[in-house]
Amino acid sequence: MKLTIDRDVFLENLNIVSRGLPSKTSMPSLYGIKMDVTSQNMFLTTSNMDISIEVMIEDKSLNIEEPGKCLINGKFFIDIIRKVNSKKVILQLLDDNQLYIKVDRGEYKLRVMNYEDYPSIDFVTLENPLSLETSLIKSIIRETGFATAKSEKRPIFTGVNFKLVNNELTCVGTDSYRLAQKKINLNDSYNDFNIVIPSKSLDELLKIIDNNDETINVYFESNKVLFKYNNVMFQTRLIDGQFPDTQRVIPTSYLATLKFNKDDLVQAIERVSIVSPHDTEKNRELTYSTVKLNISKNQNIEISTSNSQVGDAKEEVIANEIDAAEEFQIGFNSEYMLDALRSFTDYEIIIELSGNVKPFVVKGTNTTNLLQIILPVNL
């Protein structure tokens, strides 16, 4: 194997496949990057058994003198390419099982790993993929992924549920204390499906996708899903299990409806939560600050908190619109509320309250396909 390639092009692709390298594994071969060089292209593959990534390099700067293949330690190899100052990189596989790396004023030799030890990775490319714009995929991940569970105690809640029925795609993330839901009507016809994709995998996919408005093809199998984007194939396992029916937790009637300037409400909650008490609820690996929203008889709205060790805080918040027949008081996790509010790009948001201890809804005035639901905190 012998080739020359532009260093920046090579590093860009190495950074992509680095997302598939494991931080810890019982299979030493997975610490490697698998390189397969044909007479025309170069393929780089990594996997941590949860996600697998393959990039195909066919850049005009790629000059292949001899095809070949090798498995090289990913961390050391990427660190070398990242730190060298060179326009071109020359790679050559030597007879003594070393990879020779030549740059402007430097030479490096890395011992290669046993290529045959690397597990076989089958990238699925079935017919009739689901085609989505990159901007849509990114918005789904950003607007739903944050609501998934961080603890592995209930694995099904660590992923985002993608469900397609009658050409309506519903994406839901929840940790059972909050819920984020986005709905998209698709123009083309696809077979219905109901899968759960690990949120961690979606976060890695998000880091790979550029801001360009291009298309991602999505291929499904019973236990994995493949995202094909430009020269990148990103495959992840699916989470086993039945995702709960979340539609039944969405309130259908409301006692109060409030409309706020989003930024004003965000800033008020941020200020008040500085002194709010941080509580730890049983069976939860999370501390959070509790903030209270109060609607008075004269329909003044107040955000407040009380901390016996620090002090108290309250602010009056002016609603753009208010529809409340009676006094109302509800407590909420300030971090959950801020996450929900920041998921919207709207100038105004709507909060719909169904009861003091019932889930409440956060919506955008213009974003009709996204809603956030938060379970209140008992005061």
Image: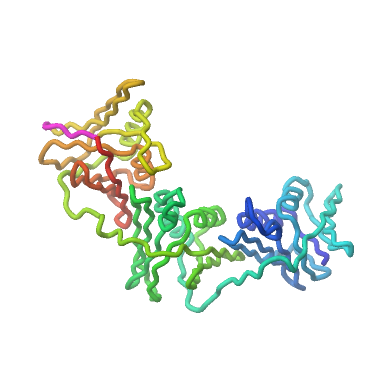
Q: Position of residue 372 (x, y in %)?
A: 32, 50
Which quarter of the figure has residue 122? Answer: bottom right
The residue lying toward the viewer, choosing from 83 and 353, is 353
Nearer to us in this view, 251 or 156: 156
Span colored in magenta = 293-298
- Would residue 187 appear left or right of 360 to someone viewing this image? right
Q: Quadrant of the N terminus?
A: bottom right
Is 60 placed left or right of 185 in the picture? right
Farthest bottom residue?
A: 127
Q: Nearer the viewer, residue 241 or 328?
A: 241
Q: Is residue 14 above or below residue 43?
A: above
Residue 234, given in percent of the width and then of the height, sits at: 57, 63
Q: Is residue 107 magenta?
A: no
As displayed, is residue 209 above or below residue 2?
A: above
Q: Residue furthest front?
A: 283
Quadrant into which the C terminus falls: top left
In the image, 131 versus 117, the foreground residue is 117
- Scheme of colours in the image: rainbow
What is the x, y in percent for residue 259? 23, 42
Q: How many marks?
A: 0
Q: Is residue 187 left or right of residue 83?
A: left
Q: Position of residue 64 (x, y in %)?
A: 80, 67
Residue at the image position 21 percent from the left and 45 percent from the top: 353
- Residue plotted at (38% across, 39% down): 335
Residue drawn at (46%, 62%), measured in percent from left and top? 239
